[in-house]
Structure formats: structure tokens, C-alpha cells
Image (tube, coloured by chain):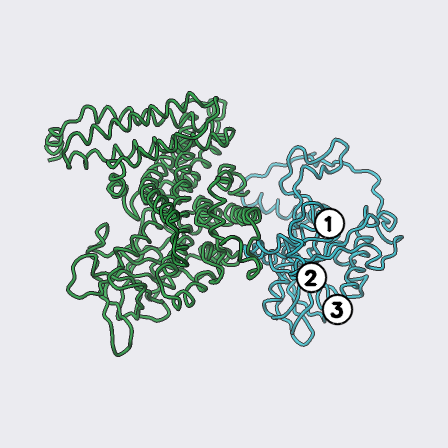
Amino acid sequence: MKLNIIVLAKQVPDTRNVGEEAMNSDGTVNRAALPAIFNPEDLNALELALQLKENNPGSRITILTMGPHRAADILRQGLYRGADAGVLLTDRAFAGADTLATSYALAAAIRKIGEFDIVLCGRQAIDGDTAQVGPQVARQLGLPQVTYTRKIIELKEGKMLVERSIENGIELVEAPLPLLLTVDATADACRPANAYRLLRFHRAAIPTEQATEGFRYAEQLAADTELQLKEWSLTDVDGDATRCGLSGSPTKVRKVENVVFQAKESKRYSASDEDIKALVSELLANHTIG
Amino acid sequence: MNYYTDNKVLRHYLSHPLMQRIVEMQENGYTQAAKFNYAPVDFAEAIEGYEQVLNLVGELCAEVIAPNAMAVEEDGPKLKSGRVEYAPATEKNLDIFRKAGLMGISLPREYGGLNFPRTIFILIEDVVTRADAAFGNLWGLQDCAETIHNFGSDEQRDRYLPRISSGETMSMDLTEPDAGSDLQSVRLKATYSEQDGCWYLDGVKRFITNGDSDVHLVLARSEEGSVDGRGLSLFIVEKSCGGVHTRRIENKMGIHGSPTCEIVFNHARAELCGSRRMGLIKYVMSLMNGARLGIATQSVGLAQAAYSEALEYAGSRKQFGKEIVKFPAVYDMLNTMKARLDAARSLLYETARNVDMAGQFSNLSRQRNLTPEERNESKIFAKKADALTPLVKGIASEIANQNAYDCVQVHGGSGYMRDYVCERLYRDARITSIYEGTTQLQVVAAIRYATSGYYAQLLDEYLSVEIPDSIKPLFERVKRLSDSYKLAVEKVQSLGCQESLDFLSRRIYEMAAYTIMAALLIGDTASNEELFASSLCSFVALAESLVAGHTAYIENYTPEILGIIKDNIK
């Protein structure tokens, strides 16, 4: 069957390679010092979407992101890897959104996209690590959801069999379509960008970029509609301004503390079997392991 | 990590003035954009596209290919019922490169290729071979498709080339147990069957890289009773048609991930590529020139890997309270490695551009008659390509070995252990000065350009560039090198003794190569002083010591010495 798949992706600062200039002296993130990248688990989600498309020819993948204009780059990266279309949700009204306001805006955009069978997104973003946006989007849209997805086993008669990671193992769950899956890093790594698509889709642009001086591919965009990326504002998705951005965000950060863990007491164990057994039972008893 | 963006020198070669013409010809005046949605609309977009693909390759090489190299080598290819099974990590590498669309780099778009010029293919190969020389072989063999493109029929092009673009692998089956450097003695038998309307091959090929490929190019004797190169033709054999199997994978010193096979043809169905009798004298010569440039590139990739590994180790390893890179004995080695690397690369891209332009004209000549000016220009590029290819193949491969040697030395005892990349580089580099023609054979191919004065003429051309005052003193020193080289050639010719010329040719060859590399670095420095000035300074000093040493040898040489030498090794 032909599927309409939506992949939610976020442009995030690359927190995996943090240098000395990564934090400002006031404790906020110095975004200029960190390259903006495709959130890693969103790439796992995109890979599962691409596999679904391979197994269901004629399917269509739309990649949706919310952010400033430069986040259009994430849409292009999605297209390089095989997505079919891109939507950037961008408006000053969305700025300062917490997870609730973000999921509200994304849900509004998904409604605007219209028909869909599956929404895929990464489990969490490496900048906030909340793992809340996916589940909240599902809730806002009234969709069933499977979190921590690692593999899609099969899709049959409107139902999907999914393998998800749980502590110490995996779980098989079945869920009806349409549904939302959050995907974790144990899923297949995303395939690379494809050179042919790179050479074609590097021209893809949102209207704001098309209007900037020196944009060179107006003619190609007119001829090749797949190069036209969508750019939606709050009004485009019929959003309620009070539920977006800072005003729609109940989360208030009062203070950020830098907590450093330090060993306050230490114990010594020898390498004997008895000592190792004692150590293991102690760790089990205080739930450090197990 | 990214092996393209971390090396600014690569980008420099995209900006060479000749690139504009190369791309213009490759893109046929940018006329393909209407037909293919990934074709560039102009030069700026073409270059932007090359950069983006190089960026992708650089990332895949640093993040996937290089980290896989150890597993590729340790598992290695296995022989199972006459077929080669690649190591799992090799399969992974191939899968990623196929998905990334990197298997038909220079094939035309009509055949599903990216239609990148030769020079860009070389840049990509430079990055790939730095990550894993063995994988570089499997991937680089896509270049064999050029032979089908250049000499095959329209129908063969339509049938084979799209398959190569989508990732089927190739091999060139030339060597036999009794025909290595001397390919004229190839015996593999080709017989034409009137009944079946096709050729059949019978015999054995040895030392065939990727010998269980999907599409083989095979040199075979089609003219019964002939004994020399004129009785040989080139054939295409498909694995899927059967009749060809691998009976042995060689156990080699290095490039373990690249299966070197002994293959048996048993009444294997084959089709002729091009015309009969032209196999060796035309097609294989062209194929070998391409392959030699490929090995020169692999050598530069290895020399780069060796330098990068050594630099990183020397910066982190501490002895006597400081990083070893701070000791003169160590930074001397690193500086020499860097200078040799930049020099070899400069010669590589000079060669690549000329091979590229010669190829552009030969493609054009197949579409229409060339104007007299074009014919003339075409000859100039072709001659430069022919003269520079053996020079860069020999010298770059020797430099790869020198850098690999120094890389192990910088690592000290750790470098002798299997735990570090450098010992693999050391073993991998060793083949580069042997396969596709030993350095000694490159000297044989190159020496006529020394005796004819052609290299001297090239030196004059390279040294006629405008230079900033800041490098004037170095420029003068390179001019003196050029004078010493010319004197040495004169002296050798004045001996009037063929055996002496043969005997001294390696030294003349090295003098020519080092002086030409120094002259090319002058040009690079003139256009990008920041990037090349320090390598130029170091390399000129290196070239001076080599030229001075060889000059002394040649000055003191008399033909009588040959007798003493022969006595010595009795």
C-alpha cells in the first residue's frame, strides 16, 4: 500500500563535540560555536521511514521541522537522503516554545499536511533530552503511539508490528494505523546522502530563501516543483497564538545549576570471588544495577 | 571528522584556472541541465556540486570507511566454491557507497553516471584511499568502465555502463603466470564459435585484483599462431554467464581487503570489446595509463594517511616531559613527510588535469571533427599526460613508501604493533611501487622524455609563472635545480652508451621528478602562499639534496664502472 509518512526532525546544536566555547559565561548555550546538525535519533526515524517507503513503493515522505529559516537546511538534508518533500514551520510566535507548545504547533502543521498514515520522530533531541515532544504530538492528534521503536517488523491490514527497546530487552507491540512512532538510536543508522539527490536538491529552498538576493535557481524551482520547500507560519496552520511559543509554554526555567558528582565515601574490594559477590549484591540492593 | 574538509590542500586544486575549461568541456557548455535534473547550470554550480559530493565522501571516509578498515583487513575476503566472498565490513562499505551514489563518478549521465571530470574522480579517490587503500581498489575499478565507454559499441555501452553506475564491480584481467610486466606473452585463448556467434575464453589469469568481479575486461589471444601483442584482443566477460571462477585468493603482505585472485576461464562466453588485435596495443595501453594514475592517487592517499597518523601520534605522545613532536629529530621527519606529500600531490593534479583535457578532446573528436587548433592543443595535452603519468606513478608510490616508513618510525615501538593504523599503511604502501608497472618500468616509460628534452621544456614552462617577491629566493633555487638536471641529462647523453643510460635512468628520472615537483610547488605557492609556502621551502631543500647527490653520482660515473658493478654482484 502507498503510505503517507511524516518525519519530525529538529535542527540541534552538535552537543557531541563540545569545545571550550560551547557555553556562554552566563550558562546559556553558545549556538554560534556549535555546528547545527540533524538531531541524531531523528535520522534513525528517517531511516525507518525510508525502509517503509522501499517496502511500499509509491509511498511519500514529508519531513517537518520547526525552527528559524536556517532550519530549512534540515529539510534539504532529508531530501538528500530520500525524503520527498519538506515543510518548515517558522514564525516569531513559535519562539521560546517548551515541549507542550512545540507539540501543539507540530500537531497543527500535521493536520494541515492532511492525510497521513505514520508519523515518525526521534525519541529525543540531544539539546533538550526531554523525549516529550513525540508522545505529546500523538496525544494532541489522538494517535496511538509506540515509543523507543527499534525496528518495524511488518505492516499488514492496517496494523503495524513494531519492536521496541525496553530495559534489558525488547518488546513486540502491534498498533493500528495511523500511529506515531518515536525511534531510538538502536534502530538502523540512517543511510548516507545520495550524490545524485545532493546535486539536485541543493537548490531546494523555502520562499524566504528564494527571495534573498543572489538566489540562483529560480528557473529550476519553477520547472521542478519538488525543489519548492514549504514555509508555514502560525496563520498557515490555523494555530492559536496563546498556545504557541513562550505564552503557550507552562515550563518556566527558574535556575540552572551545574551539578558535579563527587565520591563522598569509598570502599575497597579485593579481587577475590567473595568480595566481588559482596559488591554485586550491594549494587543490586541499592538498585545501582538490576 | 571529514577527510575532505580537514585538508585545505584538496580544495585548492578545485580552483585551478584550467578547471573552468575542463568543466566546460565535460558539461558540453552546460547543455544537460534541461534533460537531467542533477546537471549543473553553470561553472559555479558545477564546482559547488563537486564540493558537496567531496564533502559527503570526506564524511563517509572518516566516519565509516576508515573505522572499518581494520575489520576489512582482519576478516578479509574468503573463497567459497569458486566465488569470492568479501569481508562483512567490505560489503558494508560497498553498500554505503552504492546508496550514496558513488559508483559511477565519471560515467556520462546517459548511463546513470555523475558525469564528473577525471580530475574530480581523482580528488575523490585521493580521499577514499586515505581511508582504506584496499577498499579504494574495489571502488576505483569502476574506472574500467571508461574502456567500455571509449572503445565498446553503443549497444555494449547501453548494456554495461548503467550497471556499473549502480554499483556492479569490475576487474581488468591482464596478468598471467608467464605474462606479468611482459603482457605481449599473454596466452589465454579466445576462440570464435561461428555456431554460437560469440567468443569463448579458456585459460588462467593470475594476480587479478577483484578477480570475481561482475564484469571482467580480459586480454586474450584471439589470433591463433600469433606470438606478440598484435595477436591480442580485449574481451568482456560477465560473471553471471558462468565459465569463470576463482581458484585461489593470494595471501598478501598488504591490501588484504582487496582480493587478488587466480581465475580460471573454462569455455567462458565472451564478447569482443573494440576491434580485434587492438587489445594490447591500444585498449590496454589506455586502460593501464588510467590505472597508473589511479595507483599514483592511491599512493598520495596513503602518503596523506601516513602523515596524518604520524602527526597526530607525535602531538599526543609524551616522552621526557613533552610531546615528541617538539623534538627536532621528530619534527624533521614530519616536515619531510609533509613536503613530500604536498609535492607528490601537486604533480598528481597537474597530471590529472592534462589527462582530463586529453580525454576531453578525444571525446570531442568522437562527436565531431576537431579544428586544426583543437587538434594541436589536444596533442599538447596528450603528450603532457603521457610524459607525466609514469613520473607521478613511480615517484608518488616511492613517496608513499617513504612516508609509511617514517610514520612507523615516529610511532616507535608502538608502530611495530598491530594496534596502530601505521603498520597497515606500511604494508599497504608496499604494493604501490610494484603493481600497474614497477617503478623501474615507470622509469623505462619516462626516460625518453628526459633524453628528448621534454621534461626540461616542461620545467621552463612551469618556471615562467608570475611569482610574488616573497618567494623569489626559492624560485632562484629551483631554477638552479633545473639547470643541474639539464646538465646531468647532457652528461649522461654524452656518454653515448645505451647500457649506461639505462643504468643511470633511475637517477635522471628522480632528478626530473623532484625538480618538476619543486617547480609545480612554485606555481601552487604563487596562487596560494598561505597554503604552500612552508612546504615549498622544505621541499626545495629536499630536492636540492637529492639533485646534488645524484649529480655527484653522475659526474663521477664512467662506463667502466658497469664492469666493476657486475663483478661486485657476482
User: Which residue sits at x=60%, y=64%?
Assistant: A51
**Chain A, hue in figure:** cyan
- In the image, what residue type sits under mark 3? Glu
| Earlier residue among tags 3 and 1 | 3
Residue holding disc 2: A62
Residue holding disc 1: A211
Spot the residue most to the bottom.
B195
User: Does the CB distance between marks 3 and 1 fall below 8 Å?
Assistant: no
Q: Is residue B64 above or below residue B113?
A: above
Q: Which chain is green?
A: B
| Earlier residue among tags 3 and 2 | 2
Residue holding disc 3: A115
| Earlier residue among tags 1 and 2 | 2
Q: Position of residue A17 (x, y in %)?
A: 62, 40
Are callouts 1 and 2 both on one chain? yes
- B279 left or right of A47 in image: left
* Count of all numbered marks drawn on residues in the image: 3
Q: Quick one: quadrant of the N terminus of chain A?
A: bottom right
